[in-house]
Image: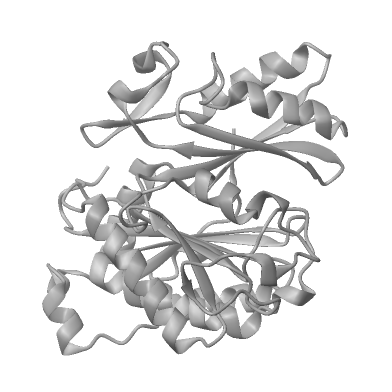
Amino acid sequence: MMSRGTISKLAACLLNISEARNAQVVETIAKATVSVKESQDLASKTHQGSELACRSTVLNIFRDYDYNRSVLTIVAQLPVLQHCVYNACVHAYHNIDLSEQHGGHPRLGAVDLIPIYPLSSDVSLEECGNVANEIAKTLAKDVRGSSFFLFGTADHPKHRGLVQRRKEVGWFAGKHGVQYDKLQQDLGANPSTRYGLTGVGASPYVTNCNVTIATQDVQFGHQIAQCIRASTPGGLPGIQAMAFAHEGNVEIACNVESFLKEKSNTGECLENKSGTIYDHYSYTSAEVIENKVRTLASERGVDIIGTALIGFTPDQALNLAIKALRSEQSEYWKTRTDVRMM
């Protein structure tokens, strides 16, 4: 495993776009991400640039046909990442008309989520928040009609979390037919049916882990999701969970948030349950999530079909990024054949 200190100022964006059924559109957006031409000014803001074989990489593309949603894992040094994400979003807005989008997953935007996460230990949440803000401001200026809500360290001065902001703007009810003129943006134009409303912000790394159970009872899935949330007594640290009908079964879709070790409100022994990133953060492992869901599902005789980790854990993302950037694999996603299953 490569040393995580060999490239400074690395950060990631897990870009969520409301398109998966047109593979050509998704790949066009991915290619735009890594096509940034470096200016002299940009080069002066990056470190170790001459040692890198490429400036940015898309580590993974996860496309879900049923949800009609894709997640692109983009990694670069922070100043470069800003330009990469901007490019990707411009192409996404051009190619995705939200008024024609149908899918089983909540969404409010053609580009639905732009989260910036630190990877290298020398990248602060404040820096990521500043970059997220600049992305939103530039897109609002250059893509007329686009609009944004802010979260995390991009949300000055309140620093409200993503779940809170999504509740405030009505994201959880967001599917085809939303009344966009009733939504409230922080930046940009009034939300429209063409572009919708995009969430932009920064936080400690968030992984997506989805567990599929062999039932069509979505209400039972909601009960399981409620039980495993961090906000529920006895729930799992750092877990935000929802349940959706998915490909004839029910999927428990989890956002796995990185959290300060001393911040857990469950009273459980984190050393036995979580992997560790950096010096001060932990996250609940996919194995723990799957076992918890299995236990709850078995109470009604429901089996687990499988577990998918969408992209990577924070440590995997960091180490694969180092490998890709040093070996000129800007399109690293092409080396991956499937989603990692438990």
Q: Position of residue 82 (x, y in %)?
A: 33, 72
Q: Position of residue 229 (x, y in %)?
A: 57, 27
Q: Residue at x 22, y 88 (%)?
A: 39
Q: Nearer the viewer, residue 283 or 318?
A: 283
As drawn, is 279 to the left or to the right of 267? left
Using the rendered view, name the quadrant where residue 293 is placed: top right
| Displayed quadrant of residue 133 | bottom left
Classify residue 284 by image quadrant.
top left
**Front residue (pair 78, 259):** 259
Using the rendered image of the protein, determine whether residue 206 is visible from the camera's viewpoint.
yes
Quarter of the figure that contains the C terminus: top right
Residue drawn at 60 percent across, 85 percent down: 94
In this picture the colour scheme is: one colour
Above or below, comparing residue 277 to residue 43 in the picture: above
**Up/down of 262 relative to 64, above or below:** above
Query: Residue 126, percent across and down?
Result: 24, 55
In the picture, the quarter occupied by the N terminus is top left
| Horizontal side of residue 249 vs 108, given as left or right | right
Left or right: 330 with respect to 92?
left
